[in-house]
Image: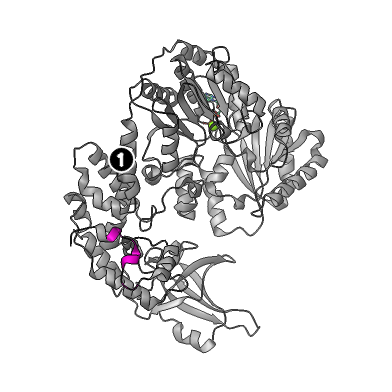
Amino acid sequence: MKSIEFLNKDVSILKGIGSKTSSILKKKNINKVSDILLDFPRATVDNITNCKIKELQIGKNHTINIIPKKYSFPRIRNLPFKVICEDETGEIDCVFFNSYEKYIRKILPINISVNITGTVNYYKKKYQIVNPKVTSLNQNQTTIIESKYSLTEGLKQSNYNRIINNVLSKLPDLDEWLSEEVLKKFNNVSWKDSILKIHKASNIVPYNSNYYRRLAYDEILATFLISSQVRKKINKVKKKIKKFNLTKCNDVISSLNYKLTNDQIYTLSEINKDISSEYKMFRLLQGDVGSGKTIVSLLSALNVTEAGYQVAFMAPTEILANQHYNLAKKLLGKYLSIELITGHTTNQFKKKIQEKINNKEIDLVIGTHSLFQKKMFFNNLGLIIIDEQHKFGVKQRKALSDKGGSNCDVLLLSATPIPRTLMMTIYGDMNVSIINQKPKNRKEVITYSKSEKKINEILSFANKQIKNNNQIFWVCPLIEESKKVDHESAIKKYEFLKKKFKDNVDIIHGLIKEENREIILKKFLKNKIKILVSTTVIEVGIDFPNASLIIIENANKFGLSQLHQLRGRVGRGTDQSYCVLIFKNNLSENAKKRIKILKETTDGFKISNEDMKLRGYGDILGFKQSGVKNFKLADPILHEDLFELAQKEISRIENSDDDLTRYKTLVKLFDHAEIINDLV
Ligand code: ADP
Ligand code: MG
């Protein structure tokens, strides 16, 4: 059977699957027959074998070879039994709750090398595995023999195995889609062989085998193909050419009190080229915090209005929308009619703005989401700009790009640097312009970490900054996953600081009314307040060139990328800026690593790479919401080379006239059928 149709059918067509089982499988996210095939026996995906204690990754499932050295069997109730084990690189504790001494002595005999499997934790400065499984006493064998599938309640192992075996026996021989050259890299193993091997093997096939890697590569390639096709399709949308001359743009540039960086000039020219082309623009402008994306986007807006179109500029928060509005007024007010719409704009005023839009009396509208969600109609929209857009995924972006109509260009701004391996995964559907350079006059922010016990030192450092006429952000994080507690901790800190710094301190948080927040921020901008205590509302985009110190409490509650974003709030002026990370005692190993990285570099791309390694790619700032597909098999950390290979292959495919139909099966296998149908 050559057909893939069978694999794309709903699982309910399989023998032995009634409505009950089928609904259980759906809970496991198994809908199509091919989903069953990609549901590999447990322990393949996450299980890392063959590494030393020193290299263990916290939170991951590991199989390691160790030598038990010492028992600890406390006689106190509720205290666990412990076996201290080692290899040549370090120590690890095997911890057993509710277990028997005799059993432990049997499975972990002193001084005899053993393989154990389990999730690695870090507790009291030591690695540990709770209730490890001993996999074999044979020193040479480092893979586990256990081919269990992770099961949802109500589904028996034996039943599920029967279902899988049934599907495996009907696997079609599919025509190869990989190119000869790529296939060679996996020792020519076919898709079918790989699937069979992985499900039927008595030893679980490790993630670095050719079988596993081939399938992981298939998954990556399928994902990239989709994005590439989406991009191609968007790039083909024709529009009316926008004609403008650059006189006003150049006037604004020369009125600035700084010189644009080369990267700013270059990205602006890329955007101008897109805008004046006969194809619709769908471009991402990516640049680290403070790299100066706003001015580039405002100049693009000016050019589009020069061509006789209206522009909509959307920001993620009201504060940021306000700041953009003020900047636009200042720089472009002379040439353009500009309005602001936020959630707080009264309906009456909105109506007025709507009228003006209809009469083409407005050129540029800046606002929050309400710009697009409410019933706003644009007369002649030529460009949509979306700032800090990392919350949108491929599908939303496509919807957005459709919204403005075919004559409307789309420019997205993002300050979230992402690891190079993920670029194509996340932004493959767009053309990307990157600002790498920071403005010249910037000094790197110096980062310190301090225990919260050293609060007096921190206060006197803050005092010194204030004496130098500089300003300070004091950030209190989410302590619990609750907004309320969040605000309380900020308020407490505010009251504490108020005693010391009197009227020099103010606070903003989510519960303070928008109008009042505005007033406070304006006061801060005018340097009438020295310390601004806040929750993470200051995280995105706001620009305060006079702030030279950011103090972040409970810094271990933030991820690396988020700390990097927060740190980016300072260091925008010409003075030396500082970031102080305050920690409670007892830092975990992971937290220590994070501080080290932050101290070492201010390069957002490097930081996001490290963040990915520490937390896994799914947790990097914003990805969870981004709708980016979670890979089932591929792992950007373990398979970095495959991501690079796929990227090269995509470029090759894009620049050749390869017949894309050969990839149709592949794409269908990976669940993108609904998007790809009209594409390939
Ligand atoms: P982001 O890219 O994070 O959105 P902004 O556009 O807010 O950064 O710019 C940050 C600050 O840098 C602003 O105060 C802006 O005026 C300033 N800036 C932008 N470009 C330059 C430049 N070429 N030289 C000096 N300062 C600049
Ligand atoms: Mg910005």
The residue at the point 60 percent across, 22 percent down is 353
Tell which of 119 and 320 is nearer to you.
320
Q: Give the SS element for disc 1.
A: helix
Answer with left or right where residue 600 lies relative to residue 666.
right
Residue 175, placed above or below residue 260 = below
Residue 152 vs 257, above or below: the answer is below
Q: Residue at x 37, y 61 (%)?
A: 31
Q: In this view, does 162 lie above or below 471?
A: below
The x, y position of residue 539, in whole percent, is: 60, 39
- The answer to whether residue 302 is seen in the rendering is yes
x then y, percent, for residue 552: 65, 45
The answer to whether any part of residue 200 appears in the image is no
Q: Is residue 451 left or right of residue 568?
A: right
How many numbered tags mark residues here? 1
Residue 8 covered by magenta stretch: yes
The percent position of residue 588, horizontal first and vertical second, equals 58, 59
Please tell me which residue is depicted at 30% across the width and 35% down the height of the picture: 232
Return the residue found at the far front.
Answer: 19
Q: Tell me the quarter of the picture where residue 147 sits.
A: bottom left
Name the residue rendered at 27%, 39% in the picture. Answer: 651
Q: What percent of the width, then of the height, locates residue 598?
A: 54, 45
Give the residue pinned by disc 1: 229
Three-letter amino acid code at the position of disc 1? Gln
Quadrant location of the C terminus?
Answer: top left
> Looking at the figure, which quarter contains the N terminus?
bottom left
Residues drawn in magenta: 7-16
> Viewer-proximal residue, 674 or 510?
674
| In this rendering, position of residue 223 left or right of residue 287 | left
- How crowded is the residue under tag 1: few (<14 C-alpha within 10 Å), some, or many (20+)? some
Figure quadrant, ligand 1: top right
Front residue of this view, candidates 467 and 665: 665
Inspect the magenta stretch and tell me whether residue 102 lies in it.
Answer: no
